[in-house]
Every structure is written in C-alpha cells, then in structure tokens.
C-alpha cells in the first residue's frame, strides 16, 4: 500500500510536533564538548541526493564555524544527533530532518533529592521538507546548517 505524500506529511507533523515552551537556554549552559551522531540513512537517501558523509561534514564545519568554544570530539558525552527520514511518491519527496542535543542530566525525586544521572534529549528541532527528489540533498544540508546556526545563537545567549 502506497501512502500519499500529503498523508505522510500530516502524519509527520502530528507525530514529530514539539510543544512551544519559553526558552531559557539552560539546555546549552556550560556546554564544552559534543560528538556528532548521524543515524544511518534509509535506502531512499541516495535517490534524494542525501549522504551521511555530507551531513556529518556539514555539521562538523557548522559547529566549528558557529560554536568555536565547543570542542567536537568522539569521546564527548554530550552529542548532537541527526535523524533524516525520507519518503518518495513517484519523483516527489518528503524529508523529515530532526536535530537533537543529548546531555547528561540528573534525575531528581519529587523532594529534589538526586536519584541518578543519565543522558537526556534536552533540545530538539525538526523540519519537514518537500520537493522533487534529487533536489532534496541541498535543501536538507541548508536546513541542518540553519538549525546549527540557531543553536549557536542560543548557545551565545546562554553563555555570554
């Protein structure tokens, strides 16, 4: 059964929606280092002109350009996570791009006493892009670059 692109986009907008909340930028406070994790792309990625290597390279360059105080290294605990979901209907393509920041956090009991430390998704931004299949690669890279730039602006507000 083929799912029409409009139905797919409606599904993504409902499932991937994040509530709007007041930003205090605490998610970026004292961030010193991150690693980059790009989820494996599905088989449709090549058809859309999207490669994992291009995304990883772009994120590395964008972080170094926009957030030079944050060191990018494989041994970092915090990480920038990217997920790209691709769906085709004939030559038309819908792509969901999600960028998350995962950091160590402390879980507290209701009375405020610490329970455990763990990693948690503290920031998530997502976009759904549509267009002709082969044209999606540059659109995805542009979207990722814009999201890193937005995160850098918020980082600078959190770390004056």
Image (tube, helix red, strand yellow):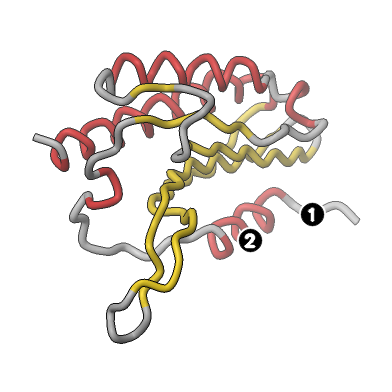
- Total count of labels: 2
- The front one of 82 and 1 is 82
* Displayed quadrant of residue 88: top right
Q: Is residue 50 visible?
A: no
Q: In the rendered structure, find residue 19 and report the number of the disc placed on it.
A: none
Q: Which residue is mark 1?
A: 3
In the image, 69: left or right of 124?
left
- Residue farthest toward the bottom in the current orientation of the protein: 111
Q: Is residue 109 visible?
A: yes
Callout 2–callout 1 Cβ contact below 8 Å: yes
Q: Locate residue 140, reporting x and y percent.
A: 54, 27
- The front one of 16 and 128 is 16
Task: Using a 10 Å C-alpha cutoff, classify the residue at mark 1 as few (fewer than 14 neighbours), some (14 to 19) or many (20 or more).
Answer: few
Please name the residue shown 78% across and 31% down the image. Answer: 44
Q: Which residue is mark 2?
A: 11
Please name the residue shown 39% across and 53% down the image. Answer: 122
Q: Locate residue 86, reporting x and y percent.
A: 70, 38
At mark 1, the secondary structure is: loop
Q: Locate residue 16, reporting x and y percent.
A: 54, 58
Please name the residue shown 13% across and 39% down the image. Answer: 157
In the image, 62: left or right of 53?
left
Q: Locate residue 21, reporting x and y percent.
A: 27, 64
Q: Distance between the Cα atoms at labels 2 and 1?
A: 10 Å
Q: Is residue 60 above or below residue 43?
A: above
Please name the residue shown 60% across and 21% down the image. Answer: 137
Say which of marks 2 and 1 sits in front.
Answer: 2
Task: Using a 10 Å C-alpha cutoff, classify the residue at mark 2 as few (fewer than 14 neighbours), some (14 to 19) or many (20 or more).
Answer: few
- Residue farthest toward the left in the current orientation of the protein: 160
Position of the N terminus, as image quadrant, is bottom right
- The mark nearer the N terminus, 2 or 1, is 1
* Displayed quadrant of residue 28: top left
């Amino acid at each position: 059964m083929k799912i029409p692109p409009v139905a797919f986009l409606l599904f993504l907008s409902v499932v991937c929606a994040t509530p709007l909340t007041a930003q205090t930028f605490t998610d970026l406070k004292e961030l010193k280092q991150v690693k980059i994790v790009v989820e494996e792309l599905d088989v449709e990625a090549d058809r859309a002109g999207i490669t994992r290597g291009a995304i990883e390279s772009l994120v590395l360059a964008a972080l170094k350009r926009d957030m030079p105080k944050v060191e990018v290294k494989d041994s970092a605990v915090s990480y920038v996570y990217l997920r790209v979901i691709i769906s085709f209907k004939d030559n038309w393509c819908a792509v969901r791009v999600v960028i998350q920041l995962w950091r160590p956090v402390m879980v507290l009991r209701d009375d405020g006493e610490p329970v455990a430390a763990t990693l948690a998704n503290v920031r998530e931004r997502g976009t759904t892009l549509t267009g002709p299949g082969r044209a999606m690669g540059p659109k995805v890279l542009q979207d990722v670059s814009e999201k890193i730039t937005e995160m850098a602006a918020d980082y600078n507000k959190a770390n004056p």
